Image: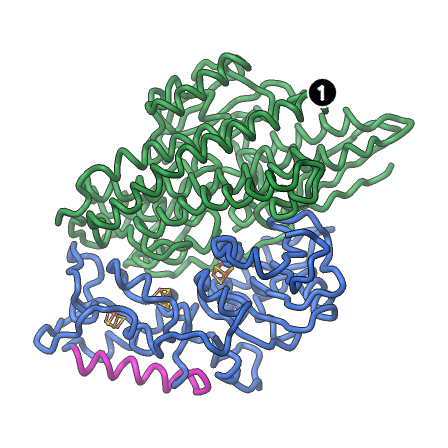
Chain colours: A blue, B green
């Protein structure tokens, strides 16, 4: 991958995240022949996005003032901006801290001079700059990265995770309660809802090839809602999951409702519809891979 | 007084180095973590059972270690012992992590320093022979990929694993994928060795060129692996003195009696010491502790290291070589486990929630990692993450100061300093996302 090659140039800007998105990108090494990586501090020693860079992938949320500065400076140079991963799209896991009690603790305990100044919360990238393509997932799989870089329009995936899961939904296996892993085993081949797990794969966008549910862990929805719910309020989406559980189980509706509001789901499921920054239109589904 | 500021790349996360220089004297060298998300705060109130899925997001590089440490802390609270099969699958997970991490550190983070390139992907434009370097890059990525594939096989999701749960794992590994993985690892083990040999040569040449492997003084070492063979999920931390004699061994719940923690005003990360003494965690600590690796090829390399550099060995560039030994070990050990039956029923045992306080220890690639939770009514009241990089902070700063003194004189600053700063920091392979969470 020589520097002077005519291959299109891309850069990766990492804001405040976990680097999982970058690690996933390195796992997809096919781009080596088709793109020229010009900036990505995790793997390349360069200190700014160079001119003539076409695509900018942004991962991580905007968590401090240096993130804002780096983001604004980088987008000026490039033609196309891709927001990669839940953190960049909605603030991600760090958004679990978007509560008054946590903010108070956090801001009180973490004042530092001469360091990037922390913001009260983690912001999505599109609070500050325009985004051309959203690539959800925590992190997106290498396959999704390749699709985003090479041919986002023609990526083939199921509408929902269930379509890629391969577990069978049974009519006559109706749990009374959510049991989680306390029961001590996960049966193969049978839908996790039938076994009393809180799996939301039935309304989460496909494309990850159901990597969690196949080996027996419920989908926590890291890819966000499917196209059917992505432009709607989260309540519509909640009602849908609630319906699925009421149809397939005898679990009391209140129990399901409470569970759906748990932290592990809320870090992903609100990522397209509910912003803490009010008055923003939903992201159009055409822009979401 | 002048302040020299060095941005850093090819490490995990956002950090920089600041040196205060006065009349050619290095007054201070600060290693600053400049990001923070606040997991220890926002995990409060989370349902305890969801922790193993959320905490891997502390760091996409060390995710597997957080996943397993979290499960162990909860098992400690709920008083449940995972079955043997679950332990083996978790070990595979941690081995996958070790392969991925050590390969990343060796090939992506530090190999470019050895030939003066800006990255592994740009090594063909360095002074070295183009064809050879390009194939080096590709082979390196393949070896690294083995780690990722192993995490996927043993952990489900490939960056933030999901398969370890309180009481066990969600499923075993079927014979067919296990065989396929086995073949893959067998095919790539010689490639890993070949790359490590090349890396060793490049390192010798670099040591020759810069005239040192690190001038810093000896230090204390901390690790939680076994002495006769590595154990990634042991329940004991050990501290070695600079002379190689074991000074302490203790369970994770007693860590506060042995280690002193301090916040710093100039960084979002704190720093720990062993009763006021500078200590080091990570690969060199483990190799100084290990009498043997328990697998043939890795033992050969360990012998070569001991023969060449003595034991305990202190020069910091040896951290990098030690990572290579562990890379080879992890390949060999994964072969041993994958040869066993991993597909029988006994994957998990049931448990009931209860209130309590628990600790989970694993040896992450960067050193001993402890998760400490207090749980009431099924919710996490307090979460504490004791991070290996934080144990290395004082050692990193001391080594940076030594490097500064080597290259700064009242007359001039040698341009090699910037490179030296990068080499020093990368030798410790710090992880900033973890250190600050
Ligand atoms: S989206 Fe997930 S993988 Fe990506 S940076 Fe955020 S937490 Fe890490
Ligand atoms: S609900 Fe979950 S387990 Fe059931 S089919 Fe859908 S993705 Fe699979
Ligand atoms: S199965 Fe669900 S949680 Fe897992 S990667 Fe796919 S969308 Fe994300």
Secondary element under disc 1, as helix, strand or loop, is: loop
Q: Is residue B88 above or below residue B299?
A: below
Residue at mark 1:
B211
For the stretch drawn in magenta, what is the main secondary structure? helix
Chain of the residue under label 1: B
| Quarter occupied by residue A83 | bottom right
What residue is shown at x 10% (from left), y 73% (from top)? Answer: A173
Q: Would residue A278 appear left or right of A138 to someone viewing this image?
A: right
Horizontal and vertical percent for residue A92?
Answer: 49, 66
Q: Nearer the viewer, residue B366 or B437?
A: B366
In the rendered image, is residue A116 in sight? yes
User: At 41% from the left edge and 19% from the top edge, which residue is drawn?
Assistant: B300
Vertical order, A242 against B210 (above or below): below
Q: Which residues are magenta?
A: A229-248
- Give whichever of B29, A171 is nearer the camera: A171
Task: Identify the residue shown where x is 20% and y is 50%.
Answer: B174
For residue B200, above or below residue B143? above
The residue most toward the right is: B411
Q: Position of residue B420 (x, y in %)?
A: 71, 32
The quadrant of the picture showing ligand 2 is bottom left
In-image side of A49 versus A242 (left or right): right
**Direction front: furthest residue:** B131
Tell me: B357 left or right of B257. Answer: left
Image spot of residue A266 (x, y percent): 40, 70
């Amino acid at each position: 991958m020589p520097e002077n090659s005519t291959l299109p140039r891309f850069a990766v800007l990492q804001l405040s995240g976990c680097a999982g998105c970058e690690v996933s990108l390195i796992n997809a090494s096919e781009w080596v022949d088709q793109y020229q990586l010009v900036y990505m501090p995790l793997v390349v020693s360069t200190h700014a996005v160079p001119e003539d860079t076409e695509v900018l992938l942004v991962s991580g949320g905007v968590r401090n003032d240096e993130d804002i500065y780096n983001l604004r400076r980088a987008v000026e140079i490039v033609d196309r901006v891709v927001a990669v991963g839940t953190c960049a799209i909605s603030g991600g896991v760090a958004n679990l801290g978007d509560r008054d009690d946590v903010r108070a603790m956090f801001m009180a305990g973490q004042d530092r001079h001469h360091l990037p100044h922390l913001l009260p919360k983690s912001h999505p990238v599109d609070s500050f700059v325009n985004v051309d393509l959203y690539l959800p997932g925590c992190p997106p799989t290498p396959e999704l990265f390749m699709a985003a870089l090479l041919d986002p329009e023609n990526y083939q995936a199921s509408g929902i995770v269930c379509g890629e899961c391969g577990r069978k939904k049974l009519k006559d296996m109706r749990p009374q309660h959510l049991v989680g892993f306390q029961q001590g085993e996960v049966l193969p081949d049978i839908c996790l809802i039938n076994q009393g797990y809180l799996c939301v794969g039935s309304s989460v966008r496909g494309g990850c090839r159901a990597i969690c549910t196949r080996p027996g862990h419920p989908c926590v929805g890291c890819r966000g809602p499917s196209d059917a719910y992505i432009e709607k309020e989260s309540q519509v989406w909640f009602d849908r999951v609630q319906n699925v559980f009421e149809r397939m189980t005898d679990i009391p509706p209140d129990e399901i409702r409470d569970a759906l509001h748990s932290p592990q789901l809320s870090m992903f499921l609100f990522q397209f519809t509910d912003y803490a920054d009010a008055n923003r239109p939903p992201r159009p589904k055409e822009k979401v891979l | 007084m002048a302040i020299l500021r060095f941005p850093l790349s090819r490490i995990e996360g956002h950090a920089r180095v600041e040196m205060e220089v006065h009349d050619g004297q290095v007054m201070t060298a600060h290693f600053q973590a400049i990001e923070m998300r606040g997991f220890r705060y926002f995990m409060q109130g989370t349902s305890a059972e969801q922790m193993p899925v959320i905490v891997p997001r502390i760091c996409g590089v060390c995710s597997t270690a957080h996943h397993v440490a979290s499960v162990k802390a909860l098992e400690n609270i709920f008083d449940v012992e995972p079955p043997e099969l679950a332990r083996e699958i978790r070990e595979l997970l941690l081995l996958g992590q070790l392969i991925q991490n050590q390969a990343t550190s060796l090939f992506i983070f530090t190999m470019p320093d050895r030939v003066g390139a800006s990255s592994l992907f740009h090594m063909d434009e360095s002074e070295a022979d183009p064809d050879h370097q390009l194939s080096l890059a590709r082979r390196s990525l393949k070896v690294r990929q083995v780690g990722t594939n192993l995490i996927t096989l043993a952990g489900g999701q490939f960056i933030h694993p999901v398969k370890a749960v309180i009481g066990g794992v969600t499923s075993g590994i079927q014979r067919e994928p296990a065989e396929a993985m086995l073949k893959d690892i067998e095919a790539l083990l010689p490639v890993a060795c070949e790359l490590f040999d090349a890396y060793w040569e490049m390192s010798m040449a670099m040591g020759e060129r810069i005239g040192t492997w690190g001038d810093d003084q000896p230090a204390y070492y901390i690790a939680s692996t076994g002495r006769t063979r590595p154990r990634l999920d042991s329940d004991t931390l050990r501290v070695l003195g600079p002379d190689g004699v074991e000074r302490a061994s203790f369970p994770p719940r007693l860590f506060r009696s042995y280690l002193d923690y301090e916040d710093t005003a100039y960084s979002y990360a704190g720093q720990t010491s062993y009763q006021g003494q500078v200590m080091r965690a990570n690969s060199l600590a483990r190799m100084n502790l290990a009498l043997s690796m328990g697998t043939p090829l890795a033992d050969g390399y360990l012998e070569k290291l001991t023969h060449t550099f003595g034991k305990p060995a202190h020069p910091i560039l040896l951290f990098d070589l030690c990572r290579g030994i562990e890379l080879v070990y992890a390949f060999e050990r994964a072969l041993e486990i994958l040869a066993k039956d991993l597909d029988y029923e006994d994957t998990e045992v049931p448990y009931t929630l209860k209130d309590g306080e628990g600790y989970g220890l694993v040896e992450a690639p960067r050193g001993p990692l402890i998760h400490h939770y207090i749980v009431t009514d099924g919710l996490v009241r307090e979460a504490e993450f004791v991070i290996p990089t934080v144990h290395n902070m004082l050692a990193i700063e001391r080594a940076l100061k030594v490097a500064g003194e080597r290259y700064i004189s009242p007359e001039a600053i040698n341009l090699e300093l910037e490179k030296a700063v990068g080499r020093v920091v990368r030798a410790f392979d710090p992880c900033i996302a973890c250190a600050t969470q």
